[in-house]
Image (cartoon, rainbow, N blue to C red):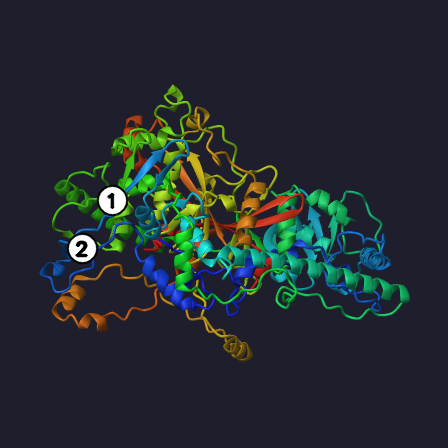
């Protein structure tokens, strides 16, 4: 479980070794594991095989209040995270690493720094650097002022930059000691303190849940009250009903623009193309696309899902008020694009068309067959800077 | 999932010039000019701090003499630069006559290099009385071209008048009254579809050295580039259609044997004998929902919809593109100009219509990874080694022949498997296969955006 163990966080480790380790841990892009082809088998000649996909059969509890599915089983959370980066730890930023971090903190116990402490130290140093730089600038300004008053040329001042600044030895942040990590001590400590219980769970979004349940059949979803497994039909209703509050109002009947359906169409589109799709709320967007996963690279693309009603009348009668469904202003576009180009991401406008109720029979909504009538198309957006495009 | 592909990193790459900063930094164009650097001003002046480093707040001791001095110096430099009389040599100024009825300026005296990329020749009935029937070719300017030349002091513009004018000594060949720059602005903007936004975009791009022409010819005399080759595309699309029809038929036949797609279980996993599944085929089987720009768009339009402002208005040629005025080449960019306050962002229908009239671009040429030393050598010999790699999509599945070979001689597999480095999908994904530039102008401030038709469906990651 300890994905962020102390061993993987030692400063001196080579990045190549880390990469190999990640390649091994995250070797499978989906929870289903494809069997290795059996060489020499006669069926292999025809590209056929009798080997089955290995299905992990995970289990989660549907929680309508948080619109998520909770994976409380540690083994299942690890599988879903490592094979395709599904879900998010509820006490972590992405990978469910709460327990590992707690264990690490206890084990460190002042002997070496945990990654959180390293981060705090870095932030403290950064703060100190900014203070030093501000002081240096103020000194230089005062010197220039004095020189101006005397009518002479001011000596060039030395302003520290991020590259040259070094924390002074008197800095109050603790320096990094060698990690001795003696086994006996650890054993003693563990006996003294009460054992840690993992209180974290992995939460899956409804899009992730439906993708795993419907396409891969590797997840069983339990009812939150009865803890009975839900059927596929029940899940299909449930993931849409969470957006209908209060439930069973007539306006919610036969809606192709249920937010779940619109978002699922976009989610499925990118997942099926092999992208790792994660939430993008921190960058003003709906989704972020990772090439292999967050542990390998930064996200390359930021996706804004833009619902498009085929029939404007459907939008007028809609109870949902979908975000971005109305034509938006250039101010909005500049805002989102500035944020994302600042973090080296390319903005993608993903238009999802919502089938018109006059064109497609609402009866199709009773099954996932309705998804065949949504279309997804992407438009890439970048700033165009004429001054730099002249060649 | 090939991690030998170029991986995106947040850190700037020293050996890959331009591309990233081109996209992400705002560049110099957002700042005002540094007036103290404008030539023609008194040369003996103190050096001012580097532009962009400002003191944002007064010092704690109150007003700063140095800051005030620096500010005053910059301010007076600006005022001096603006105060200076703009002059042009009599020998190098062009002359034109503005005909409001035609919305064209007739260039009577053409001087300078501007006319190699501006103006077009039009056959007009001769003005002289004796041969009124005779047709004469003459050089005419569109309003934005005339205004641009007047604005930068390269052309003197006249306006025909009915008043009888006293013949003047130097200007005896001129008819009409001289136009001021202000009058030119007032008269030319609004004629021949020219709005102030369109003029601002035109002037900005011209000043940067681009050749800017109208995309839709205002008259039949106006030279336009040849239409982009649609013949090749229709051929391809006929083949593509044939292929689609065949695969559709095959899929339907397969459906007959396997039963229709069960929407509660879209991916079949049962059966003891099946095609060997690997990650590629598993992901391929996941792509059963309609996607991409070729999927039909069933958007219903209300009849009273106003005409869309999203029409390609300008064609843009880079300064390096060889440009022949009478036979313009295909443009480097197509530009749409809108008022950012009056027009919201384009809808998908408007974008689809725009993309519909644009040519499909070839995938971007992969940059060669060259070290800095090699770059220097290349720059010294001034040879641009452009070697566009042929687009080779990774063979997703082994052919039957290859499989037979592998099965018969297992050791041959390693020898046969010497795949070329697969092309990097990211440049294509980031550019799209069709590109339109939209200039959103808000009270003189121009934001340019590049909208590309996405090709995610053509470049799956697995």
Residue B317 in sight here: no
* Label ID, residue A57: 1
Closer to us: B81 or B164: B81
* The residue positioned farthest toward the top in the image shown: A250
Instruction: Name the chain letter of the residue that bears numbered label 2.
Output: B
Residue under the point 61% across and 67% down: A163
**Chain to which mark 1 belongs:** A
| Residue B329 location (% of width, % of height) | 50, 59
Residue A162 sits above or below residue B191 on the image: below
Q: Residues within 10 Å of mark 2 (few under 14, many from 20)?
A: many
Estimate how packed mark 1 is, as few (under 14), some (14 to 19) or many (20 or more) residues with alpha carbons within 10 Å.
some
Horizontal side of residue B74 vs B316, given as left or right: right
Q: Which residue is mark 2?
A: B276
Disc nearest the viewer among 1 and 2: 1
Q: Is residue B297 above or below residue A188?
A: above
User: In the depicted view, which residue is nearer to us: A298 or B108?
Assistant: A298
Q: How far across and how far down the image is residue B446, in percent?
A: 62, 48
Left or right, B392 with respect to B155, comes to: left
Q: Is residue B411 above or below residue A134?
A: below
In 3D space, how far apart are the residues under numbered discs 1 and 2 (Cα atoms)? 21 Å
Residue A348 in the image, given as x and y percentages of width and height: 46, 48
Quarter location, residue B29: bottom right
Where does residue A204 sit, x and y in percent of width and height? 37, 41
């Amino acid at each position: 479980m300890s994905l962020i163990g102390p061993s993987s966080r030692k400063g001196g480790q080579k990045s190549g070794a880390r990469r190999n380790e990640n390649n091994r841990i995250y070797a499978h892009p989906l929870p289903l594991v494809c069997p290795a082809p059996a060489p020499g088998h006669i069926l292999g000649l025809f590209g056929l095989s009798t080997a089955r996909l290995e299905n992990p059969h995970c289990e989660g509890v549907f929680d309508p209040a948080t619109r998520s599915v909770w994976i409380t089983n540690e083994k299942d959370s690890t599988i879903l995270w490592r094979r395709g980066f599904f879900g998010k730890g509820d006490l972590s930023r992405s990978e469910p690493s709460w327990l590992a971090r707690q264990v690490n903190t206890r084990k460190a116990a002042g002997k070496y720094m945990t990654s959180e402490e390293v981060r705090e130290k870095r932030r403290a140093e950064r703060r100190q650097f900014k203070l030093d730089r501000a002081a240096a600038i103020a000194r230089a300004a005062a010197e220039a002022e004095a020189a101006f008053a005397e009518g002479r040329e001011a000596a060039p001042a030395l302003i520290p930059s991020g590259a040259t600044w070094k924390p002074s030895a008197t800095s109050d942040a603790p320096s990094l000691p060698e990690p001795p990590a003696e086994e006996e001590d650890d054993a003693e400590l563990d006996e003294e303190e009460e054992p840690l219980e993992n209180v974290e769970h992995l939460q899956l979004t409804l899009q992730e849940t439906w993708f795993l349940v419907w396409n891969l059949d590797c997840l069983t979803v339990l009812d939150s009250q009865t803890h009975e497994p839900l059927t596929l039909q029940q899940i299909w209703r449930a993931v849409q009903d969470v957006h209908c509050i209060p439930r069973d109002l007539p306006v919610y009947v036969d809606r192709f623009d249920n937010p779940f359906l619109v978002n699922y169409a976009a989610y499925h589109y990118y997942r099926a193309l092999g992208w790792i799709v994660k939430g993008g709320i921190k960058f003003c967007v709906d989704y972020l696309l990772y090439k292999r996963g967050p542990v390998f690279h930064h996200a390359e693309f930021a996706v804004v899902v833009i619902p498009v009603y085929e029939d404007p009348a459907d939008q007028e009668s809609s109870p949902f008020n979908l975000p971005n469904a109305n034509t938006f202003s250039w101010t909005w576009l500049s805002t989102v694009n500035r944020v994302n180009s600042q973090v080296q991401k390319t903005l993608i406008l993903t238009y999802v068309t919502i089938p018109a109720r006059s064109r497609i029979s609402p009866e199709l909504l009773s099954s996932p067959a309705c998804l065949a009538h949504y279309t997804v198309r992407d438009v890439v957006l970048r700033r165009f800077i004429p001054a730099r495009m002249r060649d | 999932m090939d991690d030998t592909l170029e991986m995106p990193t947040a850190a700037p790459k020293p050996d890959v010039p331009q591309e990233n900063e081109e996209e992400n930094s705002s560049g110099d164009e957002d700042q005002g000019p540094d007036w103290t650097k404008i030539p023609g001003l008194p040369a003996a002046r103190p050096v001012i701090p580097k532009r962009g480093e400002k003191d944002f707040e007064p010092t704690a001791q109150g007003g700063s003499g140095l800051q005030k001095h620096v500010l005053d110096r910059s301010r007076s430099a600006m005022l001096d630069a603006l105060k200076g009389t703009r002059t042009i040599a009599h020998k190098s100024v062009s002359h034109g006559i503005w005909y409001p009825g035609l919305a064209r300026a007739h260039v009577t005296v053409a001087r300078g290099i501007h006319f190699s990329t501006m103006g077009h020749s039009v056959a007009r009935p001769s003005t002289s009385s004796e041969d009124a029937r005779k047709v004469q070719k003459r050089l005419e300017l569109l309003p934005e071209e005339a205004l641009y030349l007047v604005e930068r002091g390269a052309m003197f513009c006249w306006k025909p008048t009915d008043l009888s004018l006293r013949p003047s000594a130097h200007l005896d060949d001129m008819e009409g009254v001289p136009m001021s720059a202000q009058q030119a602005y007032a008269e030319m903007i609004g004629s021949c579809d020219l709005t102030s936004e369109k003029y601002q975009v035109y002037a900005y791009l011209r000043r940067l050295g681009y050749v800017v022409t109208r995309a839709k010819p205002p008259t039949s005399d106006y030279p336009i580039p040849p239409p982009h080759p649609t013949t090749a595309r229709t051929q391809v699309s006929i083949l593509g259609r044939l292929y689609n029809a065949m695969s559709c038929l095959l899929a339907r036949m397969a459906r007959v044997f396997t039963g229709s797609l069960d929407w509660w279980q879209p991916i079949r996993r049962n059966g003891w004998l099946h095609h060997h599944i690997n990650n590629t085929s598993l992901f391929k089987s996941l792509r059963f929902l309609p996607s991409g720009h070729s999927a039909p768009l069933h958007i219903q339009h209300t009849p009273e919809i106003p005409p869309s402002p999203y029409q390609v208005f300008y064609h843009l040629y880079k300064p390096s593109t060889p440009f022949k005025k009478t036979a313009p080449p295909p443009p480097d960019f197509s530009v749409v100009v809108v008022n950012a306050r009056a027009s919201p962002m384009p809808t998908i229908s408007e974008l689809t219509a725009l993309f519909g009239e644009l040519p499909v671009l070839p995938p971007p040429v992969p940059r060669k990874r060259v070290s800095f030393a090699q770059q220097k050598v290349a720059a010294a010999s001034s040879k641009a080694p452009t070697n566009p790699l042929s687009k080779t999509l990774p063979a997703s599945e082994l052919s039957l022949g290859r499989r037979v070979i592998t099965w018969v001689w297992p050791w041959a597999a390693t020898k046969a498997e010497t795949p070329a480095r697969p092309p990097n999908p990211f440049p294509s994904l980031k550019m799209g296969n069709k590109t339109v530039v939209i200039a959103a102008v808000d009270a003189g401030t121009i934001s340019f955006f590049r909208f590309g038709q996405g090709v995610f469906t053509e470049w799956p990651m697995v």
